[in-house]
Image (spheres, rainbow, N blue to C red):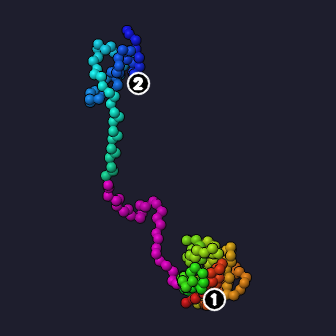
Amino acid sequence: MGQTKLCHNGHIMEASWETCPYCPKTGGGAMPAPPPPGGHAIPATRMAVPVAAPAPAPAPMPMPMPTPTAAPSARPMADAKKTRMVFEDKKMPVTGWLVALNGKYKGEDFKIREGKTTIGSAPTNTVVMVEDYISSAHATIKFVEKDGERIFILTDLDSSNGTFLNDSEEPIAREELVDNDTVTFGQTRMKFKCL
């Protein structure tokens, strides 16, 4: 048996051959069988293979698109195993207002509702005022009815620049609000009006 060599894909072939008989060829013909288990090449006299350029890589197969299906039918609540959240757009009744007397929000009014109204610069507050001297959670106004009396409690939430009531120069921690009081959050002065 003559000298052998390896093609660029690692097939054993005769040293005198210019192309590998085992590598794929263009023209759509069937690919020849791999070399026999002994690792010896098939002599050229037994295999006539046309010489051709290597075949280009096959194009990727397109992925089938999923078929749209109908939405699953609603199951009765008894079968439900998951927690469900229900959001209601029910707002508590208005009990008063804060009206800005100076600053960026001068002339604007903010509603005070039953329960607790939060005031600050964070978007999660009930009354959102984005100013340099207003903390993200600055203060709250809590409305309660006790023995037929309507009470508003103003509480500072440890704000950086304090909450002031009327003309006091001392910041408050917790005070009762009455109609026409003025409240200063940082440097924004507001008038309180109740119903």
Q: How many marks?
A: 2
Residue under pointer 2: 8
Which stretch appears magenta? 68-94
In the image as oriented, which residue stretches furthest toward the right? 170
Placement of the N terminus among the 4 image quadrants? top left
Q: Amino acid at mark 1?
A: Asp
Indicate the secondary structure of the residue bearing disc 1: loop
Q: Amino acid at mark 2?
A: His
Indicate the secondary structure of the residue bearing disc 2: loop
Spatial separation of the CA atoms under disc 2 and disc 1: 92 Å
At x 36%, y 63%, the residue is 74
In the image as oriented, which residue stretches furthest toward the top? 1
Placement of the C terminus among the 4 image quadrants? bottom right
Asked whether 57 or 194 is in front, the reply is 57
Residue 181: mark in rendering: 1
- Marked residue nearer the N-terminal end (2 or 1): 2
Image quadrant in which you'd find residue 44: top left
Percent coordinates x, y for residue 23 in the rendering: 35, 25
Is residue 154 visible in this depiction of the protein?
no
At x 67%, y 87%, the residue is 166
Asked whether 168 or 132 is in front, the reply is 132
